[in-house]
Amino acid sequence: MPNIIKPVSHFTKFESFELGTQLIDLALKYKSNPALDQQKGKGKRIGCIFLNPSLRTRVSTQLAALNLGLEPIVLNMDKEGWALEMNEGAIMNKGTVEHIKDAAAVLGSYFDILAIRAFPSLTNREEDINDFVFNQFVKYSGKPVISLESAIRHPLQSLADQITIQEQTKGEKKPKIVLTWAPHIKAIPHAVANSFAEWTLGMNHDLTITHPEGYELDEQFTRGAKIEYNLKTALENADFVYVKNWSSFNDYGKILQTDPNWMLTESHLKNAPNAKVMHCLPVRRNVELSDEILDGHRSLVQEQAKNRIFAAQAAISFLLDQ
Ligand code: CP
């Protein structure tokens, strides 16, 4: 009998409406009873590898693993690991100490599941679009990989966001969802905005995206969304307003403007009395979003952050079933 090699499944992006629905339902079950599948991952280990800072992703993924009986081990590779070489055939006579193909293979041999955070450079658009660093880990580890935010996607955040929307609407009405650009003092990646658009459209919601001209996102993520450059028009009768900064995609990684009129305040929502406001956190208060919104009745940011645990629990559980 020939060996049949089972393809390795990963959790790196939106796959289908059916899988999205299954993951949301499973996450809500785990939220009601976090210990539901406490034995499922017994004897297994998940390696959480961070090339960039994190609060929510780092902690919620470990909590999710523990809820399923897995042992999580965190490596802050940017600070504690060797400087990684990413390029094939590199002559490593400069600053890099260890090749990704060696490091990823070692990590693959230590863990049953790997989870990786690898932000974009925002200087090399081609490499970032192809998720080069993240995919090097996928390629060389040989294990199921969960994205803890790659150069272009943040699927655990997006799953948590969809769980939060589902909890609020209970599937009773088709909400008007608006993704709005906000000012920021630093050049910020596109991953959260891309993924939010990908998952929101994939789950068959109506999505309006509003931003100043020049801040158009990569069309592969926004196809099917309405693009509205007028913030006031975009926000009319919104049910959910997702606030996020991102740098320019076309003028890659650049900050084109920081107009404070794009910071969402209560006065922007006069024509959206029922609007709930979302943000993935961390948030720059009174730059991206006003205190009055963040501390007021509209804010869902703490619910989103809590749901990160159950999104991760559903994703890990899904990979354990493969
Ligand atoms: N939203 C989010 O991913 O938060 P962290 O960067 O703190 O993990």
Image (spheres, helix red, strand yellow):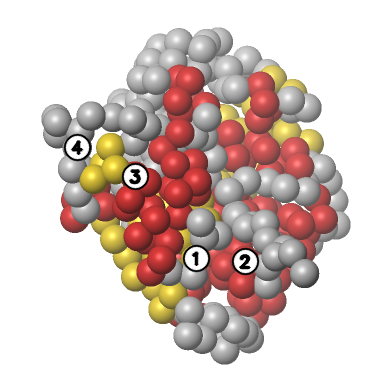
- Cβ–Cβ below 8 Å for labels 2 and 1? yes
The answer to whether residue 174 shows anywhere in this view is yes
- Please identify, in this view, whether the residue under mark 1 or under mark 4 is nearer the observer: 4
Mark with earlier residue (2, 1): 1
Q: Quadrant of the N terminus?
A: bottom right
Q: What residue type is labelled 2?
A: Leu
Q: What residue type is labelled 1?
A: Ile
In the image, residue 322 above or below residue 298: below
Residue carrying label 4: 96
- Asked which secondary structure carries label 4, the reply is loop
Q: Which amino acid does label 3 sit on?
A: Ile
Marks 3 and 1, how far apart at CA: 17 Å
The image position of residue 208, as x and y in percent, is: 70, 29
Residue carrying label 2: 319
The image position of residue 23, as x and y in percent, is: 70, 63
Q: Which mark is residue 100?
A: 3
- Please identify, in this view, whether the residue under mark 4 or under mark 2 is nearer the observer: 4
- Asked which secondary structure carries label 2, the reply is helix
Q: Nearer the viewer, residue 251 or 292?
A: 251
Q: Residue at x 54, y 40 (%)?
A: 153
Q: Residue at x 43, y 61 (%)?
A: 108
Q: Which amino acid does label 4 sit on?
A: Thr
- Asked which secondary structure carries label 1, the reply is strand
- Asked which secondary structure carries label 3, the reply is helix
Q: Which residue is drawn at 63% across and 86% down?
A: 36
Residue carrying label 1: 113
Marks 3 and 4, how far apart at CA: 10 Å
Q: Residue farthest to the left?
A: 94
